[in-house]
């Protein structure tokens, strides 16, 4: 488990990177230092060779070999130089050696001889004549562009090797220690950095359907992790909202379906036990059918509302004639109002035909709901007026009745689901209490508003405002209500 943790992986990567960086930098410093020390030795050897050439050998290039050797000896003693030197003739044969290493002459390799014949100095390292490596400079002595002798000067590299071996030791000993210490620091830092994640995970684990209102703690300072908690919290808020909607839907549905179901059950049981004739059974079945119709209306309306709340209410937005739609509603309303002998008026306070962008079927359904209510809640022989006017970029439709009116304290609630001013009377009228909720959902989906004003005993006026422009209409995405109006 720990091997798969981010902490472990972070620390591992950190340790690997650190190891690579430490090795590379150690190598770099080692190579830089060794080449720097070697180039200092080379410079010294070249200086020595040049002085010997200038002061002792070249001025007397033709002096006898013995004299040349004495001169060289004198120089080395005179300058107290701890190196080694020897002179060879132009063919490479040894003439004399001053300060030889254990009596062994400095070697002259073929490549050195080749370079010397081109009158160029040549550096090489010999590992055989001594226990430590020896740096040898073979230097050509010329007179009038003629190679007369070969001077070889050399120094042991033991002090340089000591320094480098000390350095190697320090690197080899310190690097693992530094690596271990820094890896521990890395592990500690990873722990510190990921501690809030562990806390977020723990808190998130505690959140279930029962405590969806719980939220994750937001850490200071505002960093990536606090914005992660923030994001999860807003996701939880959305989840809680939709969860509550589903719960509300189930609660509403079961509450509203309980009464018709109880009636259905009671009537069926009574008629099964007591019904004597076919006629009595038939009456029970008819009454049952009414309850079944009511239940399916409630369910259908609830589904529409649930979709609308989930911003899933589908609208078929098209341009249509609002004037024609109001004419149709007017004719429909007249037929509906006939039994109660209401007077229906249509007042189009516009100069020309009005075209609107929207879902014609849903807007028809919405207006019919309001007019149906007016017919329902107005005593026989009342007056209902449907009017239209245009203001700026909006159309204003009003439905005014001379009905019973709505008491002030109920006005703010009438658009709530299942809200009825007089529950008993509304049930007799076949109202589900969902009509105005659906009306509001349809208007809001069109980017409009609805207001109500009412005086008890005098009547009620609903004022609907809808945008004339297409861009103000907010269509939803998925398919939904496409059936003609059924309730009220
Ligand atoms: P319902 O199906 O009961 O008619 P609605 O949502 O359509 O449900 O209406 C909610 C309540 O608002 C109704 O129960 C009624 O009491 C009241 N109401 C609606 N329209 C009118 C109106 N025009 N006049 C008086 N009361 C009304």
Image (cartoon, grey):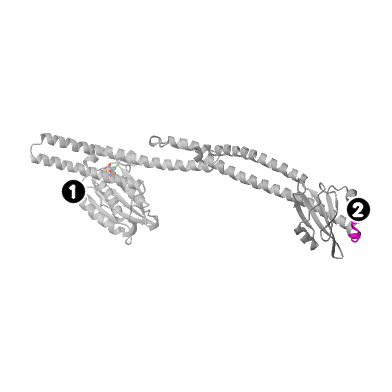
> Is 292 situated left or right of 203 in this image?
left
Image location (x, y in percent) of residue 394? 37, 55
Task: State if disc 1 and disc 2 touch (CB < 8 Å).
Answer: no
Q: How many marks?
A: 2
Please give the range of residues in magenta. 58-69
Q: Nearer the viewer, residue 376 or 447?
A: 447
Image location (x, y in percent) of residue 332? 23, 54
Image location (x, y in percent) of residue 58? 88, 59
At 59% from the left edge and 42% from the top edge, which residue is drawn? 15
* Pointer 1 residue: 339
Image quadrant where residue 264 sits: top left
Numbered disc in front, either 2 or 1: 2
Element at badge 2?
Answer: helix
Image location (x, y in percent) of residue 101? 81, 47
Residue 345 in sight: yes
**Label 2 – label 1 distance at C-alpha:** 148 Å
* Pointer 2 residue: 70
């Amino acid at each position: 488990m720990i091997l798969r943790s981010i902490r472990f992986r972070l620390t591992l990567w950190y340790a690997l990177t650190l190891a690579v960086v430490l090795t590379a930098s150690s190598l770099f410093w080692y190579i830089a230092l060794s080449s720097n020390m070697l180039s200092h030795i080379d410079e010294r050897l070249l200086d020595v060779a040049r002085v010997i050439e200038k002061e002792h050998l070249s001025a007397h290039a033709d002096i006898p070999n013995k004299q040349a050797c004495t001169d060289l000896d004198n120089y080395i003693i005179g300058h107290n130089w701890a190196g080694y030197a020897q002179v060879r003739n132009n063919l490479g044969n040894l003439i004399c050696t001053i300060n030889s290493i254990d009596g062994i002459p400095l070697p002259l390799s073929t490549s050195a001889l080749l370079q010397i014949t081109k009158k160029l100095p040549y550096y090489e390292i010999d590992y055989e004549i001594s226990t430590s490596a020896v740096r040898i400079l073979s230097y050509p002595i010329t007179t009038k562009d003629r190679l007369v002798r070969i001077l070889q000067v050399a120094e042991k590299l033991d002090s340089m090797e000591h320094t480098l071996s000390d350095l190697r030791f320090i690197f080899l000993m310190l690097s693992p220690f530094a690596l271990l210490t820094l890896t521990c620091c890395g592990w500690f830092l990873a722990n510190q950095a990921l501690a809030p994640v562990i806390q977020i995970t723990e808190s998130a684990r505690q959140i279930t359907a029962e405590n969806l209102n719980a939220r994750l703690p937001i850490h200071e300072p505002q960093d990536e992790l606090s914005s992660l908690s923030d994001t999860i919290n807003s996701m939880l808020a959305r989840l809680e909202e939709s969860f509550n909607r589903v719960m509300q839907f189930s609660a509403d549905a079961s509450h509203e379906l309980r009464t018709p179901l109880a009636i259905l059950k009671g009537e069926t049981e009574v008629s099964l036990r007591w019904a004597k004739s076919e006629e009595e059974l038939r009456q029970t079945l008819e009454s049952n059918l009414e309850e079944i119709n009511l239940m399916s209306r409630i369910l259908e309306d609830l589904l529409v509302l649930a979709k609308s709340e989930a911003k899933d209410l589908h609208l078929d937005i098209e341009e249509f004639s609002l004037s024609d739609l109001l004419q149709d509603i007017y004719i429909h309303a007249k037929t509906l109002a006939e039994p109660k002998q209401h007077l229906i008026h249509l007042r189009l306070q516009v100069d020309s035909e009005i075209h609107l962008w929207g879902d014609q079927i849903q807007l028809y359904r919405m207006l019919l709901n309001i007019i149906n209510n007016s017919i329902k809640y107005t005593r026989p022989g009342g007056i209902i007026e449907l009017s239209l006017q245009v203001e700026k970029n909006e159309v204003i439709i009003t439905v005014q009745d001379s009905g019973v009116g709505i008491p002030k304290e109920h006005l703010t609630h009438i658009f709530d689901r299942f809200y009825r001013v007089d529950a008993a009377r509304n049930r007799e009228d076949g109202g589900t209490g969902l009509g105005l909720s659906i009306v509001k959902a349809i208007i809001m989906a069109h980017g409009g508003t609805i207001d109500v004003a009412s005086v008890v005993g005098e009547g009620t006026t609903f004022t609907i405002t809808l945008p004339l422009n297409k861009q103000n209409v907010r269509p939803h995405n998925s398919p939904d209500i496409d059936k003609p109006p059924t309730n009220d």
